[in-house]
Image: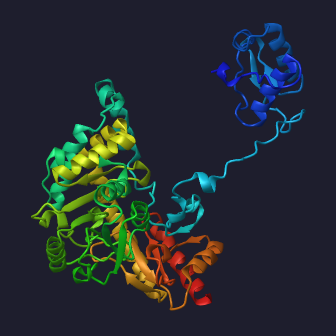
Amino acid sequence: MAIPVESFFLNPDKQGTLQSRIQQIVAQGILSGRFQKGEKLPSSRKLADHLGVSRITITLAYTELLANDYLTSRGRSGYYVSEGAPDAPTFAQDMQRSETVDWNRAISTKFSETMTLQKPADWAKYKYCFIYGQTDPTLFDHANWRLCAHQALGAKNFAPLTADYFDQDDPELVEFIARHTLPRRGILAGENEILVTLGAQNALWLATQILLGKGRSAVIENPCYPALRDILAHSRCGVVPIDVDDDGMPPEQIPDDTNVIFSTPSHQCPTTATMPMTRRKALLARAKELDAIIVEDDYEFEMSFLAAPSPSLKSLDQDGRVIYVGSFSKSLFPGLRLGYLVGSQPFIKEARALRASILRHPPGHIQRTAAYFLSLGHYDAMVKRLATTYRNRRAVMESAILKHELQIAGKGAHGGSSFWMRAPNGTDTQDLAEKLRSSSTFIEPGQSFFSEEHKPTDYYRIAYSSIPASLIEQGIANIADAVKKV
Protein backbone atom coordinates (compact mmCIF):
# COMPACT_ATOMS: atom_id res chain seq x y z
CA MET A 1 0.00 0.00 0.00
CA ALA A 2 1.34 3.41 -0.96
CA ILE A 3 1.86 6.20 1.53
CA PRO A 4 -1.34 8.31 1.27
CA VAL A 5 -0.97 11.48 -0.77
CA GLU A 6 -2.69 13.29 2.12
CA SER A 7 0.60 12.89 4.02
CA PHE A 8 2.14 15.49 1.70
CA PHE A 9 1.45 19.21 1.68
CA LEU A 10 3.37 22.29 0.52
CA ASN A 11 3.94 24.97 3.14
CA PRO A 12 3.49 28.35 1.38
CA ASP A 13 5.92 29.96 3.84
CA LYS A 14 8.79 27.69 2.81
CA GLN A 15 11.61 29.04 0.71
CA GLY A 16 13.14 27.34 -2.36
CA THR A 17 12.01 25.86 -5.63
CA LEU A 18 9.06 23.51 -5.84
CA GLN A 19 11.43 20.63 -6.56
CA SER A 20 13.59 21.28 -3.46
CA ARG A 21 10.54 21.76 -1.24
CA ILE A 22 9.09 18.43 -2.37
CA GLN A 23 12.46 16.78 -1.71
CA GLN A 24 12.36 18.17 1.83
CA ILE A 25 8.83 16.89 2.40
CA VAL A 26 9.85 13.35 1.48
CA ALA A 27 13.22 13.42 3.25
CA GLN A 28 11.77 14.85 6.46
CA GLY A 29 9.04 12.21 6.40
CA ILE A 30 11.71 9.52 6.23
CA LEU A 31 13.99 11.07 8.84
CA SER A 32 11.13 11.65 11.28
CA GLY A 33 10.05 8.01 11.01
CA ARG A 34 6.65 8.78 9.48
CA PHE A 35 7.70 7.06 6.25
CA GLN A 36 9.12 3.63 6.99
CA LYS A 37 11.77 1.79 5.00
CA GLY A 38 10.20 -0.31 2.24
CA GLU A 39 7.00 1.76 2.05
CA LYS A 40 5.83 2.80 -1.38
CA LEU A 41 5.66 6.48 -2.38
CA PRO A 42 2.59 7.84 -4.22
CA SER A 43 2.93 7.77 -8.00
CA SER A 44 4.26 10.96 -9.58
CA ARG A 45 0.89 11.51 -11.27
CA LYS A 46 -1.14 11.22 -8.03
CA LEU A 47 1.24 13.39 -6.04
CA ALA A 48 1.37 16.02 -8.78
CA ASP A 49 -2.44 16.18 -8.89
CA HIS A 50 -2.61 16.40 -5.09
CA LEU A 51 -0.01 19.18 -4.77
CA GLY A 52 -1.11 21.04 -7.90
CA VAL A 53 2.29 20.94 -9.56
CA SER A 54 3.57 19.45 -12.79
CA ARG A 55 4.38 15.76 -12.95
CA ILE A 56 7.93 16.50 -14.13
CA THR A 57 8.57 18.43 -10.89
CA ILE A 58 7.67 15.34 -8.86
CA THR A 59 9.75 13.10 -11.12
CA LEU A 60 12.82 15.36 -10.77
CA ALA A 61 12.41 15.46 -6.96
CA TYR A 62 12.10 11.65 -6.80
CA THR A 63 15.15 11.29 -9.08
CA GLU A 64 17.26 13.48 -6.78
CA LEU A 65 16.14 11.52 -3.72
CA LEU A 66 16.95 8.31 -5.59
CA ALA A 67 20.48 9.55 -6.23
CA ASN A 68 20.91 10.31 -2.50
CA ASP A 69 19.57 6.85 -1.51
CA TYR A 70 16.48 8.19 0.23
CA LEU A 71 14.41 6.28 -2.33
CA THR A 72 14.82 3.22 -4.46
CA SER A 73 13.13 2.34 -7.76
CA ARG A 74 11.58 -1.06 -8.45
CA GLY A 75 11.10 -1.10 -12.20
CA ARG A 76 7.53 -0.30 -13.15
CA SER A 77 6.35 -0.78 -9.57
CA GLY A 78 7.33 2.73 -8.52
CA TYR A 79 9.43 4.43 -5.87
CA TYR A 80 9.96 3.08 -2.34
CA VAL A 81 11.73 4.32 0.77
CA SER A 82 15.25 2.94 0.51
CA GLU A 83 16.58 0.41 3.01
CA GLY A 84 19.76 2.49 3.00
CA ALA A 85 18.07 5.85 3.62
CA PRO A 86 20.49 8.14 5.53
CA ASP A 87 20.02 8.78 9.22
CA ALA A 88 20.80 12.49 8.97
CA PRO A 89 19.33 15.15 6.65
CA THR A 90 21.34 16.81 3.90
CA PHE A 91 19.55 20.09 4.49
CA ALA A 92 18.67 22.22 7.48
CA GLN A 93 15.62 20.89 9.33
CA ASP A 94 12.86 23.08 10.66
CA MET A 95 13.45 24.43 14.14
CA GLN A 96 11.49 22.71 16.88
CA ARG A 97 8.34 24.55 17.87
CA SER A 98 8.54 26.75 20.93
CA GLU A 99 5.89 26.17 23.61
CA THR A 100 4.39 29.49 24.69
CA VAL A 101 1.40 28.21 26.66
CA ASP A 102 1.60 28.47 30.46
CA TRP A 103 0.14 25.06 31.21
CA ASN A 104 0.22 25.61 34.98
CA ARG A 105 -2.33 28.36 34.41
CA ALA A 106 -4.22 26.70 31.55
CA ILE A 107 -4.82 23.37 33.35
CA SER A 108 -7.81 23.69 35.66
CA THR A 109 -7.44 20.34 37.47
CA LYS A 110 -4.29 18.26 37.79
CA PHE A 111 -4.87 14.52 37.85
CA SER A 112 -1.26 13.32 37.59
CA GLU A 113 -0.45 14.52 41.12
CA THR A 114 -2.79 11.93 42.64
CA MET A 115 -1.42 8.91 40.77
CA THR A 116 -0.01 6.78 43.59
CA LEU A 117 0.36 3.33 42.02
CA GLN A 118 2.55 2.93 38.96
CA LYS A 119 4.14 -0.23 37.66
CA PRO A 120 7.12 -0.38 35.31
CA ALA A 121 6.47 -1.24 31.69
CA ASP A 122 9.54 -3.50 31.68
CA TRP A 123 8.40 -5.77 34.52
CA ALA A 124 8.65 -8.86 32.30
CA LYS A 125 12.42 -8.48 31.97
CA TYR A 126 12.92 -9.44 35.63
CA LYS A 127 13.79 -13.11 36.09
CA TYR A 128 12.32 -13.25 39.60
CA CYS A 129 9.19 -11.17 39.06
CA PHE A 130 6.77 -11.08 41.98
CA ILE A 131 4.52 -8.47 40.36
CA TYR A 132 0.81 -8.54 41.12
CA GLY A 133 -2.00 -8.59 38.58
CA GLN A 134 -0.12 -9.42 35.39
CA THR A 135 -0.83 -12.32 33.07
CA ASP A 136 1.19 -15.51 32.89
CA PRO A 137 1.04 -16.33 29.17
CA THR A 138 1.64 -20.01 29.88
CA LEU A 139 -1.67 -20.22 31.74
CA PHE A 140 -3.90 -18.22 29.43
CA ASP A 141 -6.10 -20.12 26.95
CA HIS A 142 -4.90 -18.36 23.79
CA ALA A 143 -6.36 -20.91 21.40
CA ASN A 144 -9.94 -20.73 22.64
CA TRP A 145 -9.84 -16.97 23.11
CA ARG A 146 -8.70 -16.66 19.49
CA LEU A 147 -11.53 -18.94 18.36
CA CYS A 148 -14.08 -16.90 20.32
CA ALA A 149 -12.71 -13.66 18.86
CA HIS A 150 -12.96 -15.18 15.38
CA GLN A 151 -16.53 -16.26 16.09
CA ALA A 152 -17.38 -12.75 17.30
CA LEU A 153 -16.14 -11.43 13.96
CA GLY A 154 -18.54 -13.67 12.04
CA ALA A 155 -21.31 -12.37 9.81
CA LYS A 156 -24.08 -13.14 12.30
CA ASN A 157 -22.31 -10.99 14.89
CA PHE A 158 -21.97 -7.99 12.60
CA ALA A 159 -24.43 -5.91 14.63
CA PRO A 160 -22.77 -6.53 18.03
CA LEU A 161 -19.41 -5.76 16.44
CA THR A 162 -20.35 -2.56 14.66
CA ALA A 163 -23.51 -1.12 16.23
CA ASP A 164 -23.53 1.83 18.62
CA TYR A 165 -25.49 0.52 21.59
CA PHE A 166 -25.50 4.06 23.02
CA ASP A 167 -26.12 3.18 26.68
CA GLN A 168 -26.74 -0.58 26.36
CA ASP A 169 -24.48 -3.65 26.57
CA ASP A 170 -24.13 -6.92 24.73
CA PRO A 171 -27.24 -8.87 25.83
CA GLU A 172 -25.40 -12.20 25.74
CA LEU A 173 -22.71 -10.97 28.13
CA VAL A 174 -25.25 -9.41 30.49
CA GLU A 175 -27.30 -12.61 30.45
CA PHE A 176 -24.25 -14.69 31.34
CA ILE A 177 -23.34 -12.37 34.22
CA ALA A 178 -26.93 -12.51 35.51
CA ARG A 179 -27.44 -16.25 35.11
CA HIS A 180 -23.99 -17.67 35.84
CA THR A 181 -21.47 -15.30 37.43
CA LEU A 182 -23.63 -13.51 40.00
CA PRO A 183 -25.49 -16.58 41.33
CA ARG A 184 -22.10 -18.03 42.26
CA ARG A 185 -21.82 -15.08 44.64
CA GLY A 186 -25.38 -15.53 45.88
CA ILE A 187 -26.60 -12.51 43.92
CA LEU A 188 -29.82 -12.37 41.90
CA ALA A 189 -30.09 -9.37 39.59
CA GLY A 190 -32.13 -8.38 36.57
CA GLU A 191 -30.70 -7.02 33.35
CA ASN A 192 -31.59 -3.45 34.37
CA GLU A 193 -29.49 -3.88 37.51
CA ILE A 194 -26.23 -4.75 35.67
CA LEU A 195 -23.86 -2.44 33.81
CA VAL A 196 -20.72 -3.56 31.95
CA THR A 197 -17.69 -1.33 32.65
CA LEU A 198 -14.12 -0.90 31.46
CA GLY A 199 -12.77 -2.88 34.39
CA ALA A 200 -13.33 -2.54 38.14
CA GLN A 201 -11.54 0.80 38.29
CA ASN A 202 -14.02 2.32 35.85
CA ALA A 203 -16.83 0.86 37.96
CA LEU A 204 -15.42 2.51 41.09
CA TRP A 205 -15.14 5.81 39.24
CA LEU A 206 -18.75 5.65 38.08
CA ALA A 207 -19.94 4.87 41.61
CA THR A 208 -17.89 7.73 43.05
CA GLN A 209 -19.16 10.26 40.52
CA ILE A 210 -22.78 9.37 41.22
CA LEU A 211 -22.67 8.96 45.00
CA LEU A 212 -20.07 11.48 46.14
CA GLY A 213 -18.98 15.06 45.72
CA LYS A 214 -18.14 18.12 47.72
CA GLY A 215 -19.89 18.03 51.09
CA ARG A 216 -20.19 14.24 51.21
CA SER A 217 -17.97 11.76 53.05
CA ALA A 218 -16.51 8.38 52.15
CA VAL A 219 -14.81 5.74 54.26
CA ILE A 220 -12.00 3.61 52.84
CA GLU A 221 -9.82 0.84 54.21
CA ASN A 222 -6.24 1.59 55.23
CA PRO A 223 -4.26 0.22 53.51
CA CYS A 224 -6.35 0.02 50.34
CA TYR A 225 -6.30 -0.03 46.55
CA PRO A 226 -4.33 3.16 45.73
CA ALA A 227 -6.33 4.04 42.61
CA LEU A 228 -9.48 4.28 44.76
CA ARG A 229 -7.89 7.09 46.79
CA ASP A 230 -7.02 8.85 43.53
CA ILE A 231 -10.60 8.52 42.26
CA LEU A 232 -12.01 9.89 45.51
CA ALA A 233 -9.56 12.80 45.48
CA HIS A 234 -10.94 13.84 42.09
CA SER A 235 -14.49 13.88 43.49
CA ARG A 236 -13.44 16.36 46.22
CA CYS A 237 -15.43 14.50 48.85
CA GLY A 238 -14.23 13.98 52.41
CA VAL A 239 -12.24 10.76 52.83
CA VAL A 240 -11.75 8.94 56.13
CA PRO A 241 -9.28 6.03 56.14
CA ILE A 242 -9.93 3.30 58.72
CA ASP A 243 -7.15 0.92 59.69
CA VAL A 244 -7.99 -2.71 58.93
CA ASP A 245 -7.25 -5.58 61.27
CA ASP A 246 -7.05 -9.32 60.63
CA ASP A 247 -10.79 -9.35 59.85
CA GLY A 248 -10.87 -6.29 57.59
CA MET A 249 -12.60 -2.98 58.35
CA PRO A 250 -14.02 -2.58 61.91
CA PRO A 251 -17.60 -1.27 61.42
CA GLU A 252 -17.73 0.45 64.82
CA GLN A 253 -15.03 2.88 63.70
CA ILE A 254 -17.07 4.23 60.79
CA PRO A 255 -17.96 7.89 61.53
CA ASP A 256 -21.58 8.96 61.92
CA ASP A 257 -21.51 11.35 58.95
CA THR A 258 -20.42 8.71 56.41
CA ASN A 259 -22.29 8.56 53.10
CA VAL A 260 -20.41 5.79 51.27
CA ILE A 261 -18.31 2.87 52.55
CA PHE A 262 -15.78 1.24 50.21
CA SER A 263 -14.80 -2.29 51.17
CA THR A 264 -13.04 -5.40 49.84
CA PRO A 265 -14.50 -7.93 52.32
CA SER A 266 -13.79 -11.16 50.44
CA HIS A 267 -10.14 -10.41 49.72
CA GLN A 268 -8.91 -7.22 51.34
CA CYS A 269 -6.51 -5.22 49.21
CA PRO A 270 -3.60 -5.59 49.86
CA THR A 271 -3.55 -7.54 53.15
CA THR A 272 -5.64 -10.40 51.62
CA ALA A 273 -7.75 -10.64 54.83
CA THR A 274 -11.23 -12.13 54.53
CA MET A 275 -14.02 -10.52 56.54
CA PRO A 276 -15.84 -13.14 58.68
CA MET A 277 -19.61 -13.49 58.55
CA THR A 278 -20.24 -11.80 61.91
CA ARG A 279 -18.38 -8.67 60.81
CA ARG A 280 -20.10 -8.66 57.40
CA LYS A 281 -23.46 -8.54 59.16
CA ALA A 282 -22.16 -5.86 61.51
CA LEU A 283 -20.96 -3.78 58.56
CA LEU A 284 -24.38 -4.04 56.90
CA ALA A 285 -26.06 -3.08 60.17
CA ARG A 286 -23.78 -0.06 60.60
CA ALA A 287 -24.46 1.07 57.03
CA LYS A 288 -28.21 0.77 57.63
CA GLU A 289 -27.89 2.74 60.87
CA LEU A 290 -26.11 5.54 58.98
CA ASP A 291 -28.27 5.18 55.85
CA ALA A 292 -24.96 4.82 53.99
CA ILE A 293 -24.20 2.99 50.75
CA ILE A 294 -21.61 0.21 50.60
CA VAL A 295 -19.50 -0.26 47.46
CA GLU A 296 -18.21 -3.85 47.53
CA ASP A 297 -15.17 -4.59 45.38
CA ASP A 298 -15.27 -8.39 45.12
CA TYR A 299 -12.01 -8.93 43.26
CA GLU A 300 -10.25 -12.31 43.10
CA PHE A 301 -13.18 -14.29 44.49
CA GLU A 302 -12.48 -16.85 41.73
CA MET A 303 -9.08 -17.56 43.28
CA SER A 304 -10.55 -19.16 46.45
CA PHE A 305 -8.71 -22.44 46.00
CA LEU A 306 -7.99 -23.11 49.69
CA ALA A 307 -11.60 -22.83 50.87
CA ALA A 308 -14.98 -21.91 49.45
CA PRO A 309 -15.42 -18.14 49.08
CA SER A 310 -17.48 -16.33 51.70
CA PRO A 311 -20.89 -15.00 50.64
CA SER A 312 -20.68 -11.55 49.11
CA LEU A 313 -22.04 -8.58 51.03
CA LYS A 314 -24.46 -8.03 48.18
CA SER A 315 -25.95 -11.48 48.74
CA LEU A 316 -26.63 -10.58 52.39
CA ASP A 317 -28.07 -7.17 51.57
CA GLN A 318 -31.78 -6.86 52.35
CA ASP A 319 -32.07 -3.11 51.79
CA GLY A 320 -30.53 -2.62 48.33
CA ARG A 321 -27.74 -0.48 49.81
CA VAL A 322 -24.80 -2.57 48.49
CA ILE A 323 -23.32 -1.79 45.08
CA TYR A 324 -21.31 -4.72 43.78
CA VAL A 325 -18.18 -4.35 41.63
CA GLY A 326 -16.87 -7.35 39.70
CA SER A 327 -14.18 -7.83 37.06
CA PHE A 328 -13.06 -10.33 34.46
CA SER A 329 -9.74 -8.53 33.97
CA LYS A 330 -8.00 -10.05 36.97
CA SER A 331 -8.82 -13.66 36.10
CA LEU A 332 -8.57 -13.37 32.29
CA PHE A 333 -5.97 -10.70 31.57
CA PRO A 334 -5.61 -7.09 32.82
CA GLY A 335 -5.59 -5.60 29.32
CA LEU A 336 -9.14 -6.88 28.76
CA ARG A 337 -10.54 -4.00 30.87
CA LEU A 338 -13.93 -5.62 31.36
CA GLY A 339 -15.88 -5.44 34.61
CA TYR A 340 -19.42 -4.83 35.80
CA LEU A 341 -21.52 -2.93 38.32
CA VAL A 342 -24.53 -4.48 40.05
CA GLY A 343 -26.94 -2.31 41.99
CA SER A 344 -30.50 -1.16 42.42
CA GLN A 345 -32.22 0.05 39.27
CA PRO A 346 -32.17 3.81 40.12
CA PHE A 347 -28.39 3.69 40.64
CA ILE A 348 -27.69 1.66 37.49
CA LYS A 349 -29.89 4.06 35.51
CA GLU A 350 -27.64 6.96 36.51
CA ALA A 351 -24.44 4.94 36.00
CA ARG A 352 -25.63 3.98 32.52
CA ALA A 353 -26.35 7.59 31.63
CA LEU A 354 -22.97 8.77 32.94
CA ARG A 355 -21.11 6.03 31.08
CA ALA A 356 -22.97 6.87 27.87
CA SER A 357 -21.93 10.51 28.12
CA ILE A 358 -18.26 9.61 28.59
CA LEU A 359 -17.56 6.50 26.47
CA ARG A 360 -20.92 5.12 25.31
CA HIS A 361 -20.12 1.48 26.14
CA PRO A 362 -17.18 -0.96 26.14
CA PRO A 363 -16.39 -2.18 22.58
CA GLY A 364 -19.04 -4.56 21.26
CA HIS A 365 -16.49 -7.00 19.83
CA ILE A 366 -14.75 -7.38 23.20
CA GLN A 367 -18.06 -7.90 24.96
CA ARG A 368 -19.21 -10.55 22.48
CA THR A 369 -15.82 -12.34 22.52
CA ALA A 370 -15.94 -12.48 26.32
CA ALA A 371 -19.55 -13.69 26.18
CA TYR A 372 -18.54 -16.61 23.97
CA PHE A 373 -15.47 -17.41 26.08
CA LEU A 374 -17.60 -17.46 29.22
CA SER A 375 -20.66 -19.25 27.88
CA LEU A 376 -18.68 -22.02 26.14
CA GLY A 377 -17.04 -22.98 29.45
CA HIS A 378 -13.52 -21.84 28.57
CA TYR A 379 -13.46 -19.29 31.41
CA ASP A 380 -14.37 -21.80 34.14
CA ALA A 381 -11.84 -24.29 32.76
CA MET A 382 -9.12 -21.66 32.80
CA VAL A 383 -9.99 -20.51 36.33
CA LYS A 384 -9.75 -24.13 37.47
CA ARG A 385 -6.33 -24.42 35.82
CA LEU A 386 -5.21 -21.15 37.42
CA ALA A 387 -6.36 -22.33 40.84
CA THR A 388 -4.37 -25.57 40.56
CA THR A 389 -1.23 -23.71 39.48
CA TYR A 390 -1.63 -20.99 42.10
CA ARG A 391 -2.12 -23.55 44.86
CA ASN A 392 1.20 -25.16 43.93
CA ARG A 393 3.05 -21.85 43.60
CA ARG A 394 1.62 -20.61 46.88
CA ALA A 395 2.82 -23.72 48.71
CA VAL A 396 6.31 -23.33 47.21
CA MET A 397 6.41 -19.65 48.12
CA GLU A 398 5.16 -20.12 51.67
CA SER A 399 7.75 -22.84 52.24
CA ALA A 400 10.53 -20.60 50.88
CA ILE A 401 9.37 -17.66 53.01
CA LEU A 402 9.49 -19.77 56.15
CA LYS A 403 12.87 -21.24 55.19
CA HIS A 404 14.41 -17.80 54.71
CA GLU A 405 12.69 -16.39 57.81
CA LEU A 406 10.78 -13.61 56.10
CA GLN A 407 7.67 -12.23 57.83
CA ILE A 408 4.19 -12.70 56.35
CA ALA A 409 1.78 -9.90 57.27
CA GLY A 410 -1.17 -11.33 55.34
CA LYS A 411 -1.58 -14.42 53.19
CA GLY A 412 -5.32 -14.85 52.75
CA ALA A 413 -7.26 -17.75 54.19
CA HIS A 414 -9.04 -18.56 50.94
CA GLY A 415 -6.27 -18.24 48.36
CA GLY A 416 -5.64 -15.29 46.09
CA SER A 417 -2.43 -14.63 44.19
CA SER A 418 -0.11 -12.78 46.58
CA PHE A 419 1.41 -12.43 50.04
CA TRP A 420 1.43 -9.20 52.01
CA MET A 421 4.84 -9.00 53.65
CA ARG A 422 6.55 -6.97 56.37
CA ALA A 423 10.26 -6.26 56.50
CA PRO A 424 12.11 -5.57 59.77
CA ASN A 425 11.23 -2.29 61.51
CA GLY A 426 12.91 0.70 59.93
CA THR A 427 13.29 -0.92 56.51
CA ASP A 428 12.46 1.28 53.54
CA THR A 429 10.97 -1.15 51.02
CA GLN A 430 11.31 1.44 48.24
CA ASP A 431 15.05 1.24 48.80
CA LEU A 432 14.81 -2.54 49.15
CA ALA A 433 13.01 -2.85 45.81
CA GLU A 434 15.64 -0.68 44.13
CA LYS A 435 18.49 -2.82 45.45
CA LEU A 436 16.76 -6.04 44.37
CA ARG A 437 16.81 -4.92 40.74
CA SER A 438 20.50 -5.78 40.57
CA SER A 439 19.58 -9.45 41.08
CA SER A 440 16.72 -9.21 38.53
CA THR A 441 14.16 -9.46 41.35
CA PHE A 442 10.96 -7.41 41.43
CA ILE A 443 8.79 -6.70 44.49
CA GLU A 444 6.12 -4.07 45.09
CA PRO A 445 6.79 -1.61 47.94
CA GLY A 446 3.76 -1.08 50.17
CA GLN A 447 3.85 2.67 50.82
CA SER A 448 1.40 3.56 48.06
CA PHE A 449 -1.35 1.45 49.65
CA PHE A 450 -1.46 3.58 52.80
CA SER A 451 -3.05 6.97 53.41
CA GLU A 452 -0.75 9.95 53.66
CA GLU A 453 -0.54 10.31 57.44
CA HIS A 454 1.82 7.96 59.29
CA LYS A 455 2.59 5.95 56.18
CA PRO A 456 4.69 2.87 57.14
CA THR A 457 7.67 2.07 54.95
CA ASP A 458 8.31 -1.57 55.86
CA TYR A 459 5.53 -3.39 53.98
CA TYR A 460 5.73 -4.95 50.51
CA ARG A 461 3.74 -7.31 48.31
CA ILE A 462 4.94 -10.37 46.43
CA ALA A 463 2.67 -12.22 44.01
CA TYR A 464 2.98 -15.68 42.51
CA SER A 465 0.68 -15.16 39.53
CA SER A 466 3.44 -14.41 37.01
CA ILE A 467 6.47 -16.35 38.25
CA PRO A 468 7.09 -20.07 37.57
CA ALA A 469 7.30 -22.28 40.65
CA SER A 470 10.86 -23.27 39.72
CA LEU A 471 12.08 -19.67 40.19
CA ILE A 472 10.27 -18.85 43.44
CA GLU A 473 12.83 -20.34 45.84
CA GLN A 474 15.77 -18.37 44.44
CA GLY A 475 13.69 -15.21 44.18
CA ILE A 476 12.74 -15.43 47.86
CA ALA A 477 16.39 -16.09 48.73
CA ASN A 478 17.33 -12.90 46.87
CA ILE A 479 14.78 -10.95 48.90
CA ALA A 480 16.04 -12.42 52.17
CA ASP A 481 19.64 -11.55 51.34
CA ALA A 482 18.67 -7.98 50.42
CA VAL A 483 16.64 -7.59 53.63
CA LYS A 484 19.67 -8.59 55.71
CA LYS A 485 21.89 -6.11 53.90
CA VAL A 486 19.41 -3.22 54.17
Image quadrant holding the C terminus, namely bottom right
Q: Where is residue 398 in the image (x, y as percent from the top left)?
A: 40, 80
| Image quarter of residue 409 | bottom left
Q: Where is residue 443 in the image (x, y as percent from the top left)?
A: 52, 73
141 or 62: which is nearer to us? 62
Q: In this view, does 162 lie to the left or right of 82?
A: left
Residue visible at 45% across and 58% down in the picture: 136
444 or 205: which is nearer to us? 205
375 or 367: which is nearer to us? 367
Q: Position of residue 207 (x, y in %)?
A: 30, 57
Residue visible at 33% across and 49% down in the picture: 197
**Residue 437 appears in view:** yes
Q: Residue 293, relative to residue 38: is it above or below?
A: below
Q: Residue 103, relative to residue 217: is it above or below?
A: above
Image quadrant holding the N terminus, namely top right
Count of numbered tags: 0
Residue visible at 33% across and 41% down in the picture: 356
Q: Is residue 382 left or right of residue 109?
A: left
Residue visible at 20% across and 69% down in the picture: 308
